[in-house]
Image (cartoon, rainbow, N blue to C red):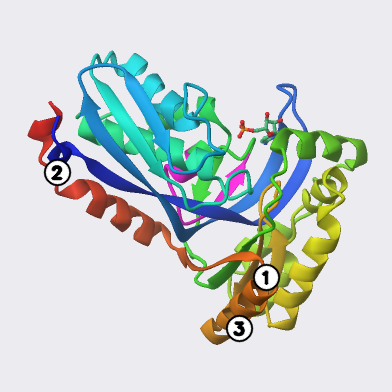
Amino acid sequence: MSRADERTVPSFAKVNLGLEVLGTRSDGYHELRTLFQTVDLRDDITLRPRRQGITIECSHPGVPQDESNLAWRAAESLRRHAKVTRGVAIRIEKRIPVAGGLGGGSSNAAAVLMALNRLWRLDLDPDVLNRLGRRLGADVPYFLVGGTALGLGRGDEVYPLRTQVKAHLVLVDPGRPVSTAAVFSRVDAGLTPRENSYTIFRFVSRDLEGATAFRLLSNDLEQAALEEAPDLARTVGRIRGTLVREGALLAALSGSGSSYFGVFDDPQRARRAHAALASQGFAVHRCRTLSLDQYRKAWARALGYISVRSWR
Ligand code: C5P
C-alpha cells in the first residue's frame, strides 16, 4: 500500500472542569457527575489500510504497542461488529500526557472508531459507536461527542450543553502517572453520599455565565489522588499556587490526575502562568477550549474530503 492511502485524524484531550463522585455502583464503578471539556491539545492518529490484521505504533515509549492498546481494541471491536476482513496500521503521534487524567487513551479509541467507521464506509449509527465505545472505557463515549458536556452514570452518559465554555487553559503535567483504579478505590474509604451536592447543576443552570461561576467547581478525586501519590502533594501545591496567583478562575486536577490545569478568561494571564510554570521546570501546555461545533468541524475537515476508493 502506498503512503497516499494514509489518513491522519485528530485525537483531542479533555479536562474535567468539575467532577462529583456520588457513590459506588453494583458493577464496581462509581456513579459520577462530571463536566467534560475538550481542549485543543491533540495526538495525531494516522491510519493506513492493510490487507489484514491490525498493527499499532506509538511515538511514546510508555504506551503499549500491542493488543492491550485501547486504539487497537477499538479497531478490533469495530472489525468484529461489522464483520470487516480488512486490516489497518495505526500510528499514534503522542502529545497528550500519558496516564494524566486527560483522556488520551479514550480519545485515541474514539478517534479510531469514528475514523474507521468512515474509512471502511460502515455508516454505523452514533448509538452503535456509543455502545462499542462504552465497552472500551467510561470516557470513550464522551470523545464521540466533544465540546462542553455533562457526563452522568459512569461518566458514559453524555449530554452536550447548549452553552459551551470558552476559555484559555494551562495544563501542567507533573510527570508522575497515577492509576485511575487506585484513586477510585481510595475514594471509597472516605465516601459520603453526594446526592445533595448540586455544584455542577448550579454551574450549568447559570448557563456557564461569568467568571465567578467557575468557583463552584471542584474535583472529588483530588484528595484521593494526593493520598495515592503523597509525593505529588507538594508539587501540586506549587502548581496550584502559581495558577491562582496568575489569576486562574479555576485550578483543579483533571480526572484522577495527575495533570493539573488552570482556566483563564484572559490570554495574557494564561501566557504569564505558562511562562512561570515553565521556568519552574514543569512540562506545561497552553491551550484553548474546543466547543462542540469546533470539535465537529475538526472531524469534518479530517474526514470530509476522502478518496474512499483507496480504502475499499
Ligand atoms: O472505564 P475505564 O477503564 O476508563 O476506568 C478505569 C478504572 O477507573 C475502572 O476500572 C474503575 O476502577 C475506575 N472507574 C470507576 N468509576 C467510573 C469510571 C472509572 O470506578 N465511573
Q: Residue at x 47, y 21 (%)?
A: 67
As drawn, is 124 to the left or to the right of 206?
Answer: left
Identify residue for label 2.
306
Cα distance between the residues tagged 3 and 2: 41 Å
**What residue is rendered at 70% in x and 50% in y?**
257
Q: Is residue 60 left or right of residue 77?
A: right
Q: Name the amino acid type tagged 3.
A: Arg
Foreground mark, 3 or 1, reads 3
Q: Point out residue 24 in the picture as x, y percentages from the top left corner.
A: 78, 31
Q: Is residue 23 visible?
A: no
Q: Secondary structure at mark 1?
A: helix
Q: Amino acid at mark 2?
A: Ile
Using the numbered discs, state the Cα–Cα distance from disc 3 to disc 1 in whole angstroms.
20 Å
Q: Is residue 149 magenta?
A: yes
Q: Position of residue 216 (x, y in %)?
A: 74, 67
Mark 3 burial class by Cα count in 10 Å: few <14, some 14-19, many 20+: some
Between residues 215 and 14, which one lies in front from this camera angle?
Answer: 14
Numbered badge on residue 214: 1
Chain-order first, disc 2 or disc 1: 1
